[in-house]
Image (cartoon, rainbow, N blue to C red):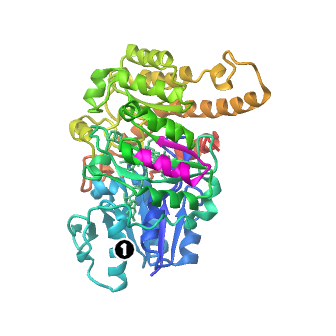
Amino acid sequence: MKILLIKPPLNKTSIIGDSLIEPLELEILAATVSQYPCRILDMRIDPDLRSALRDFRPDVVGVTGYTTEVPMVRALIRRVKMLAPSAFTVVGGCHASVVPGDFFASGVDAVAVGNGEALFPRLLDARTRQADLASVTGLWLRAKAGYTYTGDPPPLRDLDTLPPPARWLTQSYRHRYFFGRNRPAAAIVTSRGCPFRCTFCSIWKMMHGKYLVRNVDTVVEELHEIRERHVFIADDNTLSHARHAGSLATAIGRAGLHKRYKMYGRADAIVARPDIVAKWRSVGLETVIMGLESFQDGRLSQFNKGSTVDLQNRAIAILKANGIRVRAYFIVDPDFTQDDFQALLDYVEREEITEPMFSILTPLPGTELFEQSRERLVLDRHELFDLVHAVLPTRLPRRQFYAEFSRLYRKSYPLKKILGIDGAPLRPGRLVGGGLAYLKMRAITRRMEQAYRIEEQIHAKTRTDQPGVRHEAGHPAAKDHALSPLGAGLSRRRDAAGLDGDPGR
Ligand code: B12
Ligand code: SF4
């Protein structure tokens, strides 16, 4: 039984960020079935699906995908079935887990719900024994009419019994993985889930509210095996379990690992335990990514963020005092007025937030926000759920809203600041680094400016397509959005304009 696991290509119609992170979810799945020959095809780097199928001849093909990747994954599976008709195809991941119906589509034999660590080995075992797959819980299986559900998946109870991710399967790609300026960069998970309940987040829904942490010794063992110096801790929330976060930093320090880390952290956890932050700094923590979301307490409580602006400001001060970079994420509400945009910029400037990132409030399927606002969606194409398109109505005229949105980036990253010459003496090294950073930031801003045009073009296409749109099971946004001729044409035009190269590369 040979298994091919696929990370889909980058979505050409979406605006992508400044990172390419290893496909941990696939490495984790592969590790649970190491008795079988297995390969990972990362199509973000190597798009040659045909050769992979021809050379390896897999019996099972597993594909992962985010919400933005639904059309891409469907098209991909159709191609897999065309090129390798006898392969059994299964789709999983965070979107499949909350709206499996979006993958009830041509070529998809099964859709996996929830975490795959227990499910995937059972699925392969059943396939090897040619047993009835109905015994494998957590699957939607293709049946004569539609798909049938085998029952709820086995819960993920413990992260310590799991083998380390099969990173050797991404060996040939590893030099290409990066985060911001850090390249090559590896990723690791030290915990899963989150104890908080933000309305725009699907993580706690998917993890059924659980927050699991790994034994620090196994994390350190895994870090020892990671060759890359830069490590992105891809937990949902690393610092909220204070005892775990503290002992992990101690264990890393004791092990003498000389690595540089980036992690997600909440303001309340940072304010509650500045000593842990300092400890992490001493063992290599460079950047904390904080979802600040808003500069107004009212909006924070609307999101059920469980934080306040005062806490955020204190957390920023603590991180700065420790020499830790802050990458702060803000949510731009489609309801924003011009004054709100300006107030956000003022806040960023006042708090001297040097790396702000902005995203548009997006009701991702599976979130409470989606339930609250599904009737108000004005865009329903999966690829536009990328947090830089306003899928909800905007208070400002849409063109103006997008102009204000890209202005956030332009104003937050002025040339002087990026070049690092605001106040500091001019140095050649700094100028070169700053120049590259400037070009990268301009590329990102141009992409933001594209958002409105992409939306307009897709909108026009959707209007002319209306009679032919096929509705399938799942949420109302589950129309067939397989890559349309427009999508292909659009990506060609963007390619021609040199806009589809990753700005970080
Ligand atoms: C690291 C990360 C990234 C990295 C990319 C990681 C990567 N290699 O692709 C970066 C920073 C680039 C990124 C970007 C984005 N991200 Co992100 N990211 C994460 C984060 C924090 C961790 C991902 C991870 O490694 N998880 C650990 C693995 C083990 O968990 P998992 O992916 O759920 O996989 C398990 C199951 O889903 C299942 N499974 C998964 N695939 C398969 C396949 C098969 C066949 C089977 C059987 C099972 C299975 O088994 C796995 C093991 O249990 C998650 C949060 C999270 N908890 O997942 C958000 C998350 C995935 N990101 C999210 C979002 C919204 C985005 C962006 C759109 C944001 C943006 N505008 O920049 C982009 C989209 C990028 C894109 N390609 O479209 C959302 C996705 C929501 C959704 N419904 O799609 C999440 C869930 C965060 C959130 N708060 O909601 N992200
Ligand atoms: S947004 Fe962050 S803090 Fe809120 S539930 Fe999701 S992971 Fe937890």
**Residue 93 sits in quarter:** bottom left
Say if 335 sits above or below 22 in the image.
above
Q: Mark 1: which secondary structure? A: helix
Q: Is residue 387 visible?
A: yes
- Vertical order, 348 against 218 (above or below): above
- Image spot of residue 180 (x, y percent): 59, 40
* Residue bearing the label numbered 1: 121
Between 213 and 25, which is closer to the camera in this rendering?
213
Task: Locate ligand 2 by image quadrant.
Answer: top left
Q: Residue furthest bottom?
A: 129
The single residue placed furthest to the right in the displayed view is: 428
Q: Is residue 279 magenta?
A: no
What segment carries the magenta color? 245-263
Give how far across and how far down residue 70 sits, in percent: 39, 53
Please report the residue visible at 50 percent of the width from the left and 17 percent of the height from the top.
Answer: 349
Q: Residue 358 in the image: state x and y as whole percent.
A: 45, 30
Q: Quadrant of the N terminus?
A: bottom left
Q: Nearer the viewer, residue 500 or 262?
A: 262
Mark 1 residue crowding within 10 angstroms, few (<14) / some (14–19) / many (20+): many
Residue 172 lies left or right of residue 485; in this view the side is: right
The spot of residue 116 in percent (x, y) is 35, 64
